[in-house]
Amino acid sequence: MTQEPAPTRGLRRHRIGDDPAAEGQNARARIQEVALDLFIEEGYDKTSLREIAERLGVTKAALYYHFPTKEDIVASMVDDRVAQLKEVIDWANKQPRTEETRQELVRRYASMLQGPRHFKIMQFFERNQTVAKTLQSGDAMRTQMMELMDLLSDQSDPPTVQLRRSMAIFAIHASWFVFSARKVPEDQAREAGLEVALDLMSDR
């Protein structure tokens, strides 16, 4: 009777099945999750597709079916984020340019960034900034972030107002980094970031 291979480096293996075509989006999500863990643990450059396949418990051929290269894995995560951000921006573009709309836009953006996966992605790009710069999808993300900033204020607003409202977005991101080392619960960190962001957005 054939035994199951021992887990790589003592860690739990993530199987995606023998038929990659049948796994669809679930398989892609699991590959992204495991690859992201390895990229953070070992560094993007030092992680190979073979290691990702071993951690998943599949053959390299099964992994190649979904992602032929490491760059494809990273690009897929960025593409997912771009698609989410586009939904938020499309909603805002259909609304009146009011303080209530801007605050709701900030809330929707903060909601989009919930969960440990978001923090892992931020960790990855913080440590591998050159990777994001080489991706075409990275350009799309930067373009959308600028469009998001534009929706938070008008060009006729004083520079201080434009800057303060733009800083609302950075406040949401900063909460993850400030509180992660201080062991603040995720929900409290998120609420603090959103509270500061909305305060920066207020016209009062």
Image (cartoon, rainbow, N blue to C red):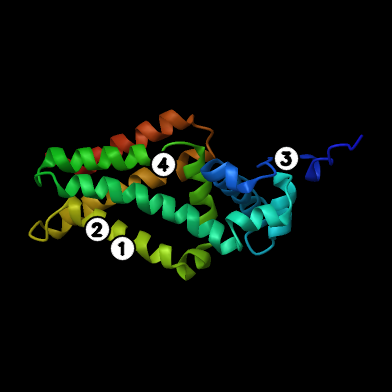
Name the residue rendered at 24%, 58% in the picture: 147
Q: Residues within 10 Å of mark 2 (few under 14, many from 20)?
A: few
In this rendering, the label closer to the viewer, 2 or 3: 3
Nearer-N-terminus badge (1/3): 3
Q: Which mark is residue 147?
A: 2
Q: What is the quadrant of the C terminus in the image?
A: top left
- Horizontal and vertical percent for residue 118? 47, 44
In this rendering, the label closer to the viewer, 2 or 4: 2
Nearer-N-terminus badge (3/4): 3
Tell me if residue 47 can be seen.
Answer: no
Tell me if residue 150 can be seen.
Answer: yes
Which residue is the extreme one toward the right? 1
- Horizontal and vertical percent for residue 65? 62, 56
Q: Quadrant of residue 14?
A: top right
The residue that mark 3 highlights is 13
Q: Which mark is residue 143?
A: 1
The residue that mark 4 highlights is 175
| Mark 2–mark 1 distance (CA, rounded to whole Å) | 6 Å
Horizontal placement of 28 versus 192: left or right?
right
Name the residue rendered at 66%, 45% in the picture: 19
Q: Name the kind of residue labelled 2 in the image.
A: Glu
